[in-house]
């Protein structure tokens, strides 16, 4: 390990209301290392790094850069000490060009020399083999290009310590590999890299050292070469866990949803689904893979009747009943026709739950129309809320406590618990485990599997390919609204799916990600 | 790397843990006393004895039976209108057109009062009430329909509707309904068109108290109330639950306008006994403050509207007895409102002062 320490964080505490995000955390970042900050969602990784990047200000504790105690109260301060962060949600202005985004917010001289800016952007790009056009507008960029631009932005400001918050969440396996090469290159230049992640394989592949946080506390750090995924998981979770998904073979699968030539055009006239055809079977988990925004949301919403369909058909066949066409019906009609679609939407609080209400109020979303007369029936939803709370171990002070104050995992349990309680024949979920801790994720996976064993057609939109490969029976891959493949999940590799996700343009080519 | 060292900021803000009800009320009561103290300073700056001034406010508004009645008469339309806008605000539909809906209701009531002055009182009053409800609802329908259909901005729309209806009343005053030619005044209602008194106050107070209970039940125990809450929190979730957002928007606004119209009937028939262009007298706006301060809780609205009525009535007494100009009374009212609203900030956030500490040795 190179001998000098770049940053020391000491006794850092940060609270948000009654939630202690960081509690007395110590962390060192060495010069010229790749440090992986590991922890479950909600363990305080991002909060800790946000304090280094000047987004938050610690309630207590000290930060030293080199040997000097520093106060970082804005991102500008952070850049002064050579610290730059690439956030999970990109902070770019989409109508501006790459170069314009780079200089945004810098103290500039009265006359802005964009040529000079472009030249320097080019210089940085050449050094790390980025392929980016300084004149290109951000709205024309792919996700991977946007990320590259964020990295350039930080390097332009002279950062020596780069913090990346879950950078691979939005990338294909090939793009991830490219990013890792760049990070290794930067390390060679003596820069320190902190990468926030909860994916163990990435830690093993990339990092020199790993530091683990759990529930806001610093648990420990170690050299990656001296540890293994099992030990790291135990540190993250705090007790030994087995990470296996039980995947029984489908029993007597029956066609449940037959989708043919489904085309969806959004309000801006962009084609989101392009002649999509497939069949979802009862008793099977159908995974849907694809880069974010490839049409997953529109697919699920059009089946649920929430998204207008341009053309195509969605035929639904309940057990032993004739098939029914779903296109053109309202969500309510779809339900009344005896079609039960349990839909766990992508945006949990924005769609599917009411943040200001408690669990009981949210259970009513599915039953508010029940009963005659004008009065609302609160008794059944209340009992259901208590049942879900107990069965799925939802942590909440009270079933009437606003769900927006609950942690992401508990919010998800409320939603999934309610949807499963309607005894669906088709269960669709989008990013069901996003933001959940490992333990809860496995509870959700097992719920999906048990639904499948009951004969439910499970449609599972996921982002973690490793999970899709372990959980699903078949995987449908979407790219730009087109189906690029429907594959047997038991006989395919992550890389092959990765190629399908980018529509197979440069199969096997090493420069795949450069075109982004 | 530059070697400039930043100074730690003097203080920073953080979110508070959820407070117990007792603590929240302690903050609210404290803010009330802060308002009283600031009010003292305002009186002192004007050369008045603050104790005498506060004494005057209290005795002027509550001291005698007649003054108490007048205070209640001020509170009635405030409470009624705050109740009327509650469903809208819960739905995050910013109806700031209560003023216009009140006036529209008053026009409806006045039409029957002037056209059939000799009908038996119960019949006439029922007709007037029904007309006011319909007129108020019509006035609320337009912004709701445009919002539901084309997503227009309801804030601007409802506001503009206020000016139109006030213009209409001015035209009525000078035209078709003018009493003495050239007077620009609509004649007083006949005796049959005036709301009867109960305990010396027009019976509107009974109506608004009944409304308080109605709105409480409507918002908390009916399907409509649930729909309103879901639409207000997340229209997408409402769609997902199979609710017809446009229909709910229009229906809720109709209810709101109808209640506003009823308030218009009460002020025209009970308080003014005629119609004139400022029959609503700013109540539609003050009611927004009442609704927010009460955090849309109907029962708390009773207290808040009464409190504002005390300040309003008391400031009149201040002017007559101590020569305090109305502008100073307005400042006092403003101080109270400001402190009561500002305390919500301290309920949600706390200020942490960063003490200066000695530099400790760096532990590696």
Image (cartoon, rainbow, N blue to C red):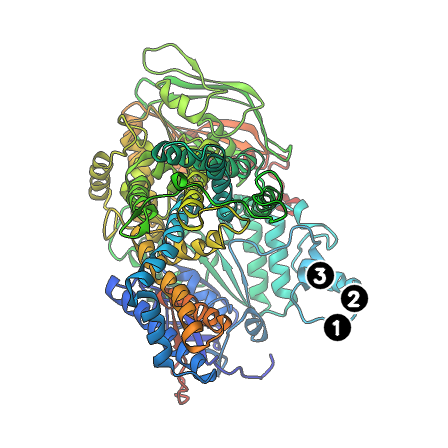
Chain identity of mark 3? A
A128 up-or-down from B109: above or below = below
B29 up-or-down from A359: above or below = below
Q: Say whether residue A265 is left or right of residue A439.
A: right
The nearer-to-camera label among 3 and 1 is: 1
Chain identity of mark 2? A
Q: Are marks 2 and 1 in contact (CB under 8 Å)?
A: yes
**Residue depicted at 72% across the width and 52% down the height:** A133
The nearer-to-camera label among 2 and 1 is: 1
> Which residue has dot 3 on it?
A121
Secondary element at tag 1: loop
Estimate the x, y position of residue A55 in percent, counting from the top left: 50, 66
- Residue A402, visible in the rendered structure: no
Estimate the x, y position of residue B342 in percent, counting from the top left: 42, 67
Query: Tag on residue B231?
Result: none
The nearer-to-camera label among 2 and 3 is: 2
Quadrant location, the C terminus of chain A: top right
Q: Are marks 3 and 1 in contact (CB under 8 Å)?
A: no
Q: Earlier in the sequence, mark 2 or mark 3?
A: 2
> Which residue has dot 2 on it?
A113
**Residue depicted at 46% across the width and 21% down the height:** A329
Q: How many marks?
A: 3
> Which residue has dot 1 on it?
A109
Mark 1 neighbour class, 10 Å CA radius: few under 14, some 14 to 19, many 20 or more: few
Secondary element at tag 2: loop
State the separation of the CA atoms marked 2 and 1.
9 Å
Q: Earlier in the sequence, mark 3 or mark 1?
A: 1
Frontmost residue, A477 versus A20: A20
Estimate the x, y position of residue B220 in percent, counting from the top left: 29, 42
Q: Say whether residue B355 is left or right of residue A399.
A: right
Secondary element at tag 3: helix
């Amino acid at each position: 390990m190179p001998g000098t320490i770049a940053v020391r964080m000491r006794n850092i505490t940060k609270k948000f209301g009654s939630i202690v995000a960081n509690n007395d955390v110590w962390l060192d970042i060495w010069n010229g290392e790749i440090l992986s900050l590991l922890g479950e969602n909600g363990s305080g990784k991002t909060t800790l790094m946000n304090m280094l990047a000047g987004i938050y200000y610690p309630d207590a504790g000290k930060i030293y850069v080199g040997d000097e105690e520093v106060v970082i109260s804005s991102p500008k301060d952070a850049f002064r000490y050579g610290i730059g962060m690439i956030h999970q949600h990109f902070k770019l202005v989409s109508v501006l060009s790459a170069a314009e985004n780079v200089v945004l917010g810098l103290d500039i001289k009265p006359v802005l020399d964009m040529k000079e800016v472009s030249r320097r952007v080019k210089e940085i790009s050449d050094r790390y083999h980025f392929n980016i056009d300084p004149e290109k507008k951000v709205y024309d960029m792919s996700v991977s290009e946007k990320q590259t631009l964020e990295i350039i932005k930080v390097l332009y400001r002279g950062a020596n310590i780069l913090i990346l918050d879950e950078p691979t969440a939005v990338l294909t396996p090939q793009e991830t590999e490219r990013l890792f090469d760049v990070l290794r290159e930067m390390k060679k230049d003596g820069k320190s890299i902190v990468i926030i992640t909860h994916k163990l394989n990435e830690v093993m592949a990339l990092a020199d050292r790993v530091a683990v946080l759990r529930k806001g506390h610093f648990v420990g750090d170690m050299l990656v070469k001296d540890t293994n995924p099992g030990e790291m998981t135990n540190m993250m979770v705090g007790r030994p866990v087995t990470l296996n998904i039980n995947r029984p073979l489908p029993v007597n699968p029956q066609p449940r949803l037959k989708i043919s030539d489904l085309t969806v055009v959004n309000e801006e006239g962009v084609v989101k689904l392009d002649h999509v055809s497939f069949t979802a079977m009862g008793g099977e988990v159908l995974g849907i893979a694809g880069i974010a925004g490839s049409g997953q949301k529109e697919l699920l919403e059009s089946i649920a009747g929430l998204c207008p369909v341009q053309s195509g058909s969605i035929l639904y066949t309940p057990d032993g009943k004739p098939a029914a066409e779903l296109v053109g019906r309202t969500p309510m009609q779809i339900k009344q026709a005896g079609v039960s679609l349990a839909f766990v939407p992508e945006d949990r609080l924005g769609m599917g739950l009411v943040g200001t209400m408690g669990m009981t109020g949210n259970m009513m979303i599915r039953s508010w129309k029940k009963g005659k007369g004008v009065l609302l029936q609160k008794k059944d939803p209340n009992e259901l809320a208590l049942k879900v709370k107990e069965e799925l171990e939802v942590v909440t002070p009270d079933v009437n406590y606003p769900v927006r104050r609950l942690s992401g995992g508990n919010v998800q349990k409320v939603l999934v618990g309610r949807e499963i309680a309607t005894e669906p024949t088709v269960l669709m979920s989008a990013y069901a485990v996003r933001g959940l801790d490992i333990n809860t994720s496995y509870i959700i996976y097992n719920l999906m599997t048990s639904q499948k064993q009951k004969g439910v057609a499970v449609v599972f939109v996921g982002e973690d390919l490793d999970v899709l490969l372990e959980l699903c029976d078949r995987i449908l891959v979407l790219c730009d609204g087109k189906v690029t493949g429907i594959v047997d999940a038991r006989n395919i590799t992550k890389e092959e799916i990765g190629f399908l996700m980018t529509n197979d343009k440069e199969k096997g080519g090493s420069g795949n990600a450069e075109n982004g | 790397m530059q070697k400039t060292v930043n100074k730690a900021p003097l203080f920073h803000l953080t979110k508070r843990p959820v407070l117990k009800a007792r603590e929240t009320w302690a903050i609210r009561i404290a803010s009330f006393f802060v308002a009283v103290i600031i009010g003292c300073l305002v009186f002192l700056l004007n050369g008045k004895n603050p104790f005498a001034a506060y004494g005057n406010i209290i005795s002027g508004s509550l001291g005698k039976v007649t003054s108490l009645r007048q205070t209640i008469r001020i509170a009635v339309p405030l409470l009624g209108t705050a109740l009327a806008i509650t469903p809208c605000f819960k739905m995050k539909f910013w109806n700031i057109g209560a003023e216009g809906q009140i006036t529209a209701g008053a026009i409806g009531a006045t039409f029957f009062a002037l056209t059939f002055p000799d009908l038996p009182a119960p019949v006439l009053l029922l007709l007037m009430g029904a007309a006011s409800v319909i007129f108020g609802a019509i006035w609320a329908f337009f912004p709701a329909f445009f919002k539901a259909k084309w997503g227009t901005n309801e804030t601007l729309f409802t506001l503009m509707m206020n000016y139109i209806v006030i213009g209409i009343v001015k035209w009525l005053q000078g035209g078709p309904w003018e009493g003495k030619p050239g007077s620009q005044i609509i004649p007083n209602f006949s005796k049959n068109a005036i709301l009867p008194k109960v305990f010396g106050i027009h019976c509107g107070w009974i109506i608004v108290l009944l409304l308080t209970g109605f709105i409480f039940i409507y918002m908390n125990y009916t399907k409509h109330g649930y729909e309103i809450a879901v639409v207000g929190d997340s229209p997408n979730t409402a769609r997902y639950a199979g609710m017809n957002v446009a229909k709910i928007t229009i229906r809720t606004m109709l209810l709101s306008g109808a209640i506003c119209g009823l308030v218009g009937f009460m002020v025209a028939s009970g308080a003014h006994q005629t119609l004139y262009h400022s029959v609503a007298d700013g109540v539609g706006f003050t009611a927004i403050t009442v609704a927010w301060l009460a955090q849309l809780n109907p029962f708390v609205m009773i207290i808040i509207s009464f409190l504002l009525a005390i300040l309003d009535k008391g400031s009149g007494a201040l002017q007559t007895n101590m020569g305090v100009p109305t502008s100073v009374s307005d400042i006092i009212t403003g101080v109270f409102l400001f402190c009561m609203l500002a305390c919500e900030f301290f309920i949600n956030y706390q200020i942490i002062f960063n003490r200066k500490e000695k530099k400790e040795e760096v532990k590696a």
